[in-house]
Image: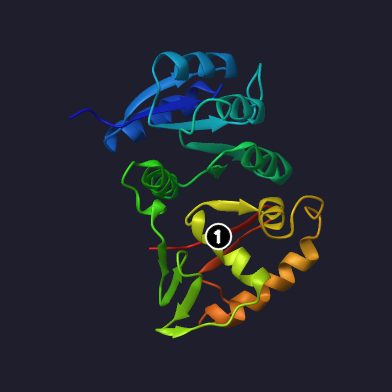
Amino acid sequence: MSLPRVLVVDDELQIRRSLRVTLRTNGYDVDEAATGEAALDSVAVRPPELIILDLGLPDVDGVEVTRRLREWTRLPIIVLSAMGEDAAKVRALDAGADDYVTKPFSVPELLARMRVALRRRAPNSESGTQLVRAEDVEIDLARRVVTRAGKEVHLTPTEYGLVRFLAQNAGRVVTHGQLLRSVLGNGYEDAIGSLRVYIASLRKKLEVDPSEPRLIVTEPGVGYRLRAE
């Protein structure tokens, strides 16, 4: 049985070497690319199961690489981003990246994010299920019902829209703009203050301790993530 293949795209040789050793030790085959154009060529000739993509490439930046890849493939893309680049993270996620990991990164966190991304893209992945569980909360997308500890939770249409979108992207970071567009439509991408109010209301209804959220987690400067089983 072949190992899952990962394409590492980074112009820093030291990072590529480090990731090569780490990923091979953890059961992955690894291809490498140092530029955006080389990455695009590599994916076309030898498609991997997952792409780890640096944003700061010397030719085509990672956001543009993501955008061009999304024109023809749904392969999982995890962005590597230096600290302080929240705007770049948002652009990459809006362009179609599945997740991001901030440099310097934790190896266990990266491996966990990779597992989630691969599960979401697998043919028999639970990401396609109509029932999403997060601790004692169940989100039944088919019936449009949300329960907590077995009891139905009353949500407003906007709150349910947010929960539905988060559930459909469970385990993946979703940007403020993506959430607002999904519920309110185009033209509301900057209504982040309103979004925070909606999220606070949701947390009161779904979290054990809304002040220390465990289900709907804030990704500072970027958006939110639903932690699901």
Disc 1 residue type (three-letter): Leu
In what element is the residue under mark 1? helix
Image quadrant where residue 163 sits: bottom right
Q: Nearer the viewer, residue 4 or 45?
A: 45
Percent coordinates x, y for residue 144 in the rendering: 51, 70
Q: Nearer the viewer, residue 116 or 179?
A: 179
Give the side of residue 58 with respect to residue 80, left or right: right
Percent coordinates x, y for residue 69 in the rendering: 56, 26
Percent coordinates x, y for residue 35 in the rendering: 57, 17
* Residue located at (46% from left, 20% from top): 43
Task: Specify the quadrant that holds the C terminus.
Answer: bottom left
| Residue wearing tag 1 | 166
Give the side of residue 47 with respect to residue 69, left or right: left
Give the side of residue 198 with respect to residue 140, left or right: right
* Residue located at (40% from left, 84% from top): 150
Image quadrant where residue 26 sits: top left
